[in-house]
Amino acid sequence: MDLSPHAIAEVRITLDSFLEAYGRGDLDEIMGFFLDDPRIIGLGTGLGERNLGWDENRAQVERDLAQSISRQVTMDWFKGAGKGEVAWAAMESTAKMQTQAGEFDVTLRGSFVFLRTDHGWRIVSYHLSVPMAVE
């Protein structure tokens, strides 16, 4: 059965909350949005950012946080769907980062797969990308 509009709204709220936690830089809070499972998959924007499992994904998030002094990610666009206990979503956001090298803004795109658990929706797979400025 397709997910209800209410369930899709829950997924969007979960994704918004995840991005807010990322902005705060709270590693434990961020990881609370992931299913604690050795099979979760993550693809980041860096060439070597291919992660399998809880530990690799946690290490990736920790590295990302260490590379920035501050960060803010605002979701500008969202589409979601799902069936049963699984939801998938795509988003586009504006990321504002401050690093040792300076400040920058970037458009960030992401696709996510969520699993509904007793504790809410949890991320089981994600892929992030930065679109090229010129097509």
Image: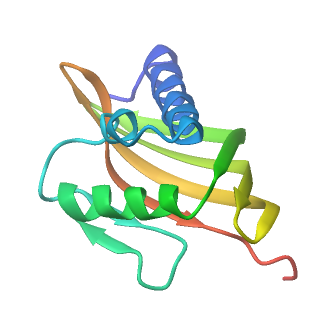
Which quarter of the rendered picture does the N terminus lie within?
Answer: top left
Figure colour scheme: rainbow
Q: In the rendered view, does 104 fall on the left or right side of 118?
A: right
Which quarter of the rendered picture does the C terminus lie within?
Answer: bottom right
Residue positioned 17% across, 43% down in the render: 36
Q: In the rendered view, does 48 fall on the left or right side of 32?
A: right
Residue positioned 37% across, 64% down in the render: 60
Residue 134: x percent and y percent? Answer: 87, 82
Q: In the rendered view, does 97 fall on the left or right side of 50?
A: right
Instruction: Determine which quarter of the picture holds residue 109.
Output: bottom right
On screen, residue 54 above or below 28: below
Residue positioned 77% across, 78% down in the render: 132
The reply to whether residue 15 is in sight is yes
Front residue of 47/103: it is 103
On screen, residue 88 above or below 131: above
Across the whole image, how many numbered discs are drawn on residues?
A: 0
Residue positioned 77% across, 61% down in the render: 106
Instruction: Determine which quarter of the picture holds residue 50.
Output: bottom left
Residue 129: x percent and y percent? Answer: 60, 68
Q: Residue furthest top?
A: 6
Residue 44: x percent and y percent? Answer: 47, 68
Front residue of 74/24: it is 24
On screen, residue 103 above or below 121: below
Q: Residue furthest front?
A: 100
The reply to whether residue 53 is in sight is no
Front residue of 46/76: it is 46
Q: Residue furthest right?
A: 134
Front residue of 77/1: it is 77
Residue 102: x percent and y percent? Answer: 80, 65
